Every structure is written in structure tokens, then in C-alpha cells.
Amino acid sequence: MLKHFILWAALSASGLAFASQTVAPPAEQVGAVAAHPFFRSADLPAWSALTPQQAVADAEYAAQLALERISAICRLTPEEATIENTYLAVDDASDELQCVVMLSQHLLYANDTAENRAASEKVSDIMSDLTAEIYSNEKLWQLMQAADTPEKVAVLSPAKKRAVKQLYDIFVDNGANLSAEKKAQRNALEKEMMQLSMQFEKHLQDFTQNWELLIKNKEELTGVPDPLMLDMRRAAAEKGLDGWLVTLRDETAAPVMAMCAVESTRKKCWEAVFGYGAGSEYDTAPIIAQLMEKRQAFAELLGFKNYADYEARTRMVHSGDEALAFVDDMIRKLKPAYDKEVAAQLKAFEEFCDKPVSSLNPWDELFATYVYYNEAQLGSGVDLSPYLKCNQVINGMLAVYSKLLGVTYKQVPSVCLKPGQTCPQGKVEVWHPSVKCIAVYDTATNVHSGTFYLDLYRRDNKRTGAWCAPLRLAEPGPGGAVQEPHIAALMANFEPPEKGVPNLLSHSELVVLFHEFGHMMHHLLSHTELKGHCAMGVAWDFTEFPSTLAENWAWSPEVLAVFARHYRTKQACPEQYLKSLSEDRKAMQVSMYMEILCKAKLDLEIHMHYAQKFKGRSLDEVSAAIAKDCQLPYASTPYSCLRNLSHCFSGGYAAGVYTYLWSEVMAADAFTLFEHSGLMNPQIGKKYRETILEKGDSIPADELYRMFMGRDPDADALIRRHKLQHNL
Ligand SMILES: [Zn+2]
């Protein structure tokens, strides 16, 4: 599906584990270097042949192939047009280019060099040019409409009917039904929106790189822990300065603001961390204002009330109003628990300051949270990392998923080659020596459903964070039988193992690992009639459901007991340590949810009511008024969190921040089914696999959810969890 070209760019992924068994690679893999190594083949990619130059050459050739196929479609007469030779043929026309895009983007994220960046940008330009050409092809659009008759659609399978509707909508979104004049306006607006998003990001990046605060008097940093002081001392020395250098680029400003006992220092850091150059040349507020005007005009041109409605057209929520109603409802329900948490926080701060505190200066908020967290001794204070040795965790996680989902993981022997080297028989290539390759089989049928790479450790030039990169969508066989495995990579930035130093994960890294593994299994177990309906194409507000759900396993004592062993003594993790996890999970949880809801509400309000509420007014003051129920009582106006919310102004989350809580609610609700039946219960695992993981986007997400749970999501599942935890 064409829509996936667009979606892939914004996808996150994660990586996984290895197991003790091994399996021989397919015979075709051995030593084979195709003329176009970025294209789909029966083999796993020959990574040493995937050079930046080859990416561009393959992309150019793939675009040419796609255009030839589109020209062939356009030679049909309206009478000859069928769904297969128009819609479905258009869908397949750029398959090779899609393969090049996925692999070149992955190579960039795995190794962010100037060459890979240039190649990836070029490939993405080739893809944009191609899609623009396809969407503006009027002959093609006429043929698609000629094929799209009730009689011809009636005989299609449900998946194909859905694909036809989806592709039709994509063409309409791209202006297929607009007059030439309006189409030109639409395309101009799209370009302007893209430029404004880039400007927004550039302002943030430039401010981050340039802002510094040199502190010469140590007293002004009272309370800041020694390791951070050392880092700042070193940063100053590197610039030939005497003192302590606080910056945004080294990420020292936020922790100083949170931990420094000196108010004036906290205020200076707050101005940077939250203000992001407000009032200066870096101010993002004027860009946001222009972007909102353009987005509103764009949405109206396509027949939508506002930009939130436009974005909602392919989501589980059907409108901006529905998303906002969800956010408001969550705020209302969490408010009692939040007020209780805020009152406790203010009381702790009052005791610390030894004077009455009824409201906070915005620059004191993180410090007050820090005081509260420490004074109230929230969480268990237990460090589980000695029990979370990376390899052990991964083998344990695979064992848990193997049982739950009825799959078998087998490690494939691998080798990292230089360009021109031949892959030894019995091995597959990887892009870095530390990367592992794992094949996934259905335990009952031995069908090979997917293969994934695990690239877990930090290294120079690798993008930060963790993500799951889809590398190939399996081409389904007749009747939906999978003919080839899906391919994906789980990427993370854990500490690499060093001689004599065990690579231990923190518990939060464990949660990240399970989250990304949730994405991974969603992709690898997709089993759909059309490859465009694979898991990664699901509605934007459903994408994070399997991954958020998977996080629950990382919090479960029953699951951790499977693999948590002390790295030296091999002793099992004490039961009270595992039980203490629930203490850690509830610490400040409501405040964290409220922070997301605050951003989600402002994101929706500005995308729905810009002209009525924001236009011509102070972004900070309007935001403070709208968000008053989900923020602390402030003594003065805080900076609007929209100022640096790149998610919705330069990322893919416009009017979509709510999806974080939306996924949390569905995950909390669905998890109750596993809690009642056992976290490794194969019957529930099978149902989950068959109704959610395998179906991908072939069926609307709300229907999938109902197929699994037998009902709609229970909005109170998350609330119940917190009411219980807070004894409300
Ligand atoms: Zn995710």
C-alpha cells in the first residue's frame, strides 16, 4: 500500500533476543549478491552489498520500474479496468522502491554517517517524487474510478475491499478530486507546512546547541550531585573556561533544574529547558502560529472542519472531538488522585522550605518533585540490575514469549562482512559483529514466519533510543499462506559488554526491551492476505497497543522469576525485590499520566480551535488557562509545553499525543485478561496472536480489539489500577 511509504518513516521499532538453538540459513543466501541487493529476494539481505551508492542506484532503477508499470496501467481502456489491474496493481507498482526505502533508512539509523544520510535523503526524495507523480496522474485516477463499480467491488475479499477504500482515500487526500487550482493550493500548502516543520525543528536544534550557562561560584550549584558536577566541570574545561558549564546539548540543564537547591540557578535553567529561546531569534511560537494557519487551511481544502479531524480520518478515534472527549474524560477521572499527589508534593516542599507553600513558581516544579520523591521515599529503592544480565534477560524473554505465543526462536549463525567478501556457507550476514540473527517459527506447524536482528548495544553513529525497524514485509502466498518470512530489527542502546564487566540492564531498560519486542512480534507474526495490511500499517492510535501491553510482562514478578538471576551468585532474585516493583510503578504515576494528558489536550485544542482560542494571543497564557486542571497551581505563568513539542509540529503526532494514553488504557484493559488466565497462558496467547497480531491492518482496529476482548475497551481499566494503588 502506498500509505506505508509514508508511515514507515515514522515508525519505531525494537530488537530482541537470541536463543540457544541454531538453524542453517536458506541455501540461496550463501554467497549470493543480486544485481539489485536492496530489492526483495528469497534471501536475507546481503548487508555488505548495501552501500550508500547502491541504495541510490537501486532506488533510481526501482522508480523507473514503477513508472513503467504505471504507464502500462494507463494504457488500459476504462472497459478493461478491473480492481486487480488498477488498484492492486498500483499498490504493487513500487514494491522494490519500498524495499530500498526501508533498508536505507535502517542503515542510516544504525550508522548515521554523512554518506548514509545523503543516500537516505536521496532515496526518500525519489520516493516523494514518485508518489507525487502517481497521485497527480489523472488518467490513472480515471481508470481507478472506472474499475471501482459496486459489481466489481462486491466480489472482492473483505481485505481487498478495505484496500480499495484505503487507496481511494489516499488519492483523495492527495487532491485527486480537487480542481487544478485547488490541487495546486493543496500542494503549495503541503510544501509550506513541511518547511515550517523543518524550521521549528531547526530552531529547537540550534537553541539546544547554542545555549550555555557558565557558573563560576560553586555555591550556586548546591545540591547537584558530584558526577554531574564533574561532567559540567569537564565541559567548561574543554572550552577553556573556569567553572561549571550547564548546557542543553549535554542534557545537564534539566537535572540541574531538578536538583539544585538554589532558586536563581533553577530559574535560569527553566528558561532554557521550557522556554526554548522564548522572545529570542529561536522563539518557536511564531512558527507554531504560521503552521496552525496552514494546517487549518489544508484541512478545510480537503473538506475537514479542522486539522485534528483530518488526522483522525485513519485513526481509531473518528474525529478531533472524540479524541478531546477521551482526554477530558481521563483528566476528570484522574483528577482526584492527581490532586492528592499534588497536595502531598506541596506539603513535602513546604516542610523542606520550612514555610507555607500554596503555589509553585514554574521553575521550582521539578525541584519540588525531586524533594517529594526523596523525602517521601517513593518507590522501593531496590536496584534490580544485578539480576538483569542482558543475555540472560533475552533468553528468558524469548522463553516467555515462546510459551505464550506458541513460537520457537532459533539463532542463525552470522557474520559481518566487508563489501566484496563472500559469505561463508552456513552463515548469514549482519551489519555489525555484535548483531544477532534469530528466526521465528510456529511451534505447531514449523512455518517460518519471520526473522529478526538484535542490535542492542550503544556505539558511535547509532541513533539514540530504542526502536523496531521493519525491514521487509512478507509477500503473502495464495489464500494468505505466508511464502516468505517478515524481517525486522530490534535496535537499542544498552551498555555494550566489556571484558570483566557484566552488561546489566536497569529495570527501565527491561521495560523498553519488552515494549520493542511487542512491536517486533506484531510485525513478525502478521499473516494477512495483502502485504500492505501488515502490522506496521495499523491505525496510528493502535500501533502502540501491542508494545504498551507487552510492557506489563516486564513488571510482573511471575515473569521476572523466569530469568532474574544474580549475575555473580546465580541466585534467583529475592521475592520481596520482585514484589517491590509495584511500589516503583505507582510512584508519581498519576502525575506522569497527567503530564501526557496536558500535552495531549493542548495539542488537540491548538489543532481544533486555533482561530478561536490561540490566534493573536500569548501562547503561554492561553495554554496555562486551558491546562489548569492538569498542572500544578503555579505562582506565575509557565511556558507552554507546546513550545518544544516536536512530536506534533515536526514529528508524526499532530493532534495525536493522546495516543500514548489511548494505548495505556487499552493495554491496562487487555492485560486484565492475561492476569486472570496467567501471563504465559498459551490459550490466551493463541487468541491474542490470532485476533490481534496476525491480523495487522486487514480489519479495523476497534473490531480487532472486540474480537480479542469480546467488547470495547473499558476506559476505567487504567483508573481502576490507580484507584487501587492510591487506596481511593
Ligand atoms: Zn512503541
Image (cartoon, rainbow, N blue to C red):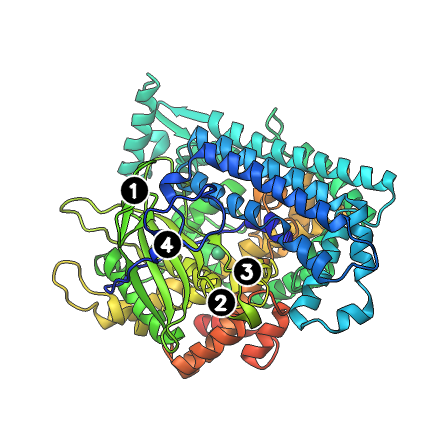
How far apart in space, not on screen, are marks 3 and 2 (Cα)? 22 Å
* Chain-order first, disc 4 or disc 3: 4
Residue pointed to by mark 4 = 28
Q: What kind of residue is marked 3?
A: Thr
Residue drawn at x 55%, y 47% is: 96
Horizontal placement of 706 versus 725: left or right? right
Residue 543, disc? 3
Residue drawn at x 78%, y 56% is: 144
Q: What kind of residue is marked 2?
A: Val
How far apart in space, not on screen, are marks 4 and 2 (Cα)? 18 Å
Residue 422, disc? 1
Give the mark toward the camera: 1 or 3. 1
Residue closer to the observer: 187 or 715 = 187
Establish whether ligand 1 lies closer than 8 Å to the Cβ of label 3.
yes
* Element type where label 2 sits in the image: loop
Residue 541, disc? none
Establish whether ligand 1 lies closer than 8 Å to the Cβ of label 4.
no
Give the mark toward the camera: 4 or 2. 4
Mark 1 nearby-residue class (10 Å; few <14, some 14–19, many ≥20)? some
* Element type where label 1 sits in the image: loop
* Chain-order first, disc 1 or disc 3: 1
Give the mark toward the camera: 3 or 2. 2
